[in-house]
Image: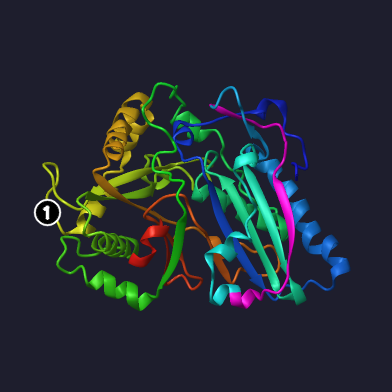
Amino acid sequence: MIKPSIPTPPPLRIHKLSLLDQISPPVFIPLIFFYQDVERHNNINLATTILGSLKQSLSDTLTRFYPLAGRLNNDNKYFIDCNDAGVKFIEVQVHGCNLSDVIETPNMEDLREFLPRVGNDDDDVLLAVQVNLFDCDQGIAIGVCMSHKVGDGSSIVTFINAWAAIARGDDEIVQPNFNLASTLFPPIDLSNSSFKPSIGMKKEKFLTRRFVFDKEKLDAFRKSTSRSQVKDPTRVEALSSFVWKHIMELKKDSKKMFAAVHAVNIRSRMNPIIPDYTFGNLWTAALAFSASDQEMVGPTDDLVYQLRRAIRKINNDYIKILQNGQDFMKHMGKLVELFSKGEVEFCNFTSWCRFPIYEVDFGWGKPIWVCTTTFPYENMVIFVSTKCGEGIEAWVNMLEDDDNLI
């Protein structure tokens, strides 16, 4: 366990969760960073150089990101006890496996081995790190898992970039704001609510497939929407619509309606805008249907239009509803009803394309590849930028029984 290098002061011992933290799924967000041509000298110096630097810088970073070293309070799920219990740090030596092979032909089962094991007996840990050292100085893979209950994708990337900056000796680190989220979205009692954060999670075995779309392919998708009411779709809008349509075609025998649930970062959609480094779960879900209803306008097959319309509804007025916890939970109750009836096939999307994941430099250069792995959700699609920034990797989760459909 790595603990903060400076004990957390008593006034900061209690970190209040926000309503958006409360309703976030009980999963860990996984990211793996691969680095090649890292000068490791020899095995004797290895522990005192690379590993020593990572441990010490992680400890120093936790002084600033102190809630990550705490534990969820067992009696009151509204806050984190910032008790400096620490984060899990695992060292692994990778034998008989070339880093280049992992990157060129990634296998999902193999990728999971580069991540620390969390969940089950480790549910109290909010952050875990695994440093994987490849034989023969081939490189390093750093796997990080952070509990979604404490923050979102933007939060974990903010933390990892701060850790890397401290590791390479950069002291100009912006102190994250941990209190703003719970101030804007106060926690409420959910004990009598029909909504459960685990909604949509499944215990079946999932398969994840990775599809890489280069700039030319993305441009083609955007042009293919020329008949849409949306004349200037973004890359993510066009790709989301393409994947959504493809999943509908694969499951055309289903008699269900199809809906897209797209995660939306609300930091830039608030008035006033709040900084990217504001820590916590600051996102909500936009819901779009493939078929029109009495509230819809436009052609029923115009998926790009339906997506954009749903996403643009997440504005400052909508966020004010979020801030009224009871009203928002009534709104969430409608989603629970849709899900419980089993009449809708949900396709879940989240985009990490704007996150600076390829800026994570621990002092030996930027990563040659950054990836994620499987989430316990059916039809879950995660978009991650390619290293050049012009392409997008789509990580698609489906049930094992649907593998023949991909």
Residue 56, image x, y percentages: 78, 52
Quadrant for residue 188, please give it: top left
Q: Secondary structure at mark 1?
A: loop
Q: Is residue 105 above or below residue 132?
A: below
Q: Return the residue found at the far right.
A: 44
Q: Residue at x 74, y 47 (%)?
A: 60
- In which quadrant will I find the C terminus? bottom left
Quadrant for residue 168, please give it: bottom right
Q: Is residue 210 visible?
A: yes
Q: Is residue 68 left or right of residue 134?
A: left
Exactly how many numbered labels are in the figure?
A: 1
Q: Return the residue found at the far front.
A: 401
- Is 79 inside the magenta-drawn segment? yes
Q: Is residue 94 left or right of residue 405?
A: right
Q: Is residue 126 above or below residue 73?
A: below
- Is 283 inside the magenta-drawn segment? no
What residue range appears in magenta?
78-101
- In which quadrant will I find the N terminus? top right
- By what rule are the colours in the image chosen? rainbow
Q: Which amino acid lies under the numbered mark 1 shown in the image of this protein?
A: Gly
Q: Nearer the viewer, residue 68 or 136?
A: 136
**Quick one: label 1, few (<14), some, or many (20+) residues within 10 Å?**
few
Q: Is residue 40 above or below residue 237?
A: below
Residue 32, image x, y percentages: 59, 61
Residue 341, image x, y percentages: 26, 37
Residue 147, image x, y percentages: 56, 43
Q: Nearer the viewer, residue 50 or 106?
A: 106
Q: Residue at x 35, y 24 (%)?
A: 326
Residue receiving disc 1: 298
Q: Is residue 406 visible?
A: no
Q: Is residue 102 left or right of residue 18?
A: right
